[in-house]
Amino acid sequence: MPILNYTTEINPHRTVGEIQAKLAEMGAMAVSVDYAGREPVAVMFLLNVKGMNFSYRMPANWRGVYKRLCDDPNVPRKLRTEQQAQRVAWRILQDWIEAQLALIDAKMAEPAEIFLPYSVTNTGQTLFQLFEAGQLKMLGDGS
């Protein structure tokens, strides 16, 4: 089965704007976009959690999407482009954010609980990046 949203025609800039609006509705104190050239690559936002401000950075990994589009024989050749991968990556990220905001709205989870891997640390890396690099020694098997 092809990747989610693989046929989207929606421009990444429009999707980024929709994501910014959703994050603002959730209570983000600031929302910004990181660009590589003229293309958006990540959305950053600031949340107040228990009286402290925390930054979060969520990248849109379009290169992973591009590989998936190219590897899927069910995806038409005309949709196997870097531009399409960027559109798809941003739509997938928007869907994920909207699903997480639904959990928050339903009081099933707290914003910090959901977005924790995307927390920007004092090194400028996200918590997940530190984990991936083996720098979070406090995590264990739960025993």
Image (spheres, grey):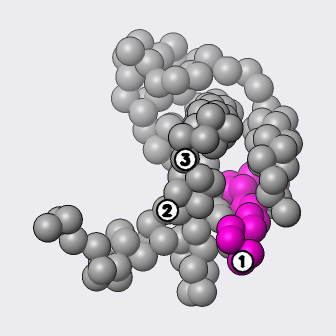
Q: Main secondary structure of the magenta part?
A: strand
Q: Which mark is residue 52?
A: 1
Rate crowding at label 1 as few (under 14), some (14 to 19) or many (20 or more) other CA atoms within 10 Å: few
Helix, strand or loop under label 2: helix
Residue at x-position 38% and y-position 22%? 72
Helix, strand or loop under label 3: loop
**Measured along the vertical axis of the image, is residue 111 above or below residue 104?**
below
Residue at x-position 54% and y-position 52%? 114
Marks 3 and 1, how far apart at CA:
18 Å
> Bounds of the magenta span?
38-53
Quick check: 130 left or right of 30? left
User: Would you name the residue on which mark 3 appears?
Assistant: 109
Which is in the foreground here, disc 3 or disc 2?
3
Rate crowding at label 3 as few (under 14), some (14 to 19) or many (20 or more) other CA atoms within 10 Å: some
Q: Of residues 139 and 120, which is closer to you in this image?
A: 139
Quadrant of the snapshot with the N terminus? top left
User: Would you name the residue on which mark 2 appears?
Assistant: 117
Residue 73 x/y as whole percent: 37, 17
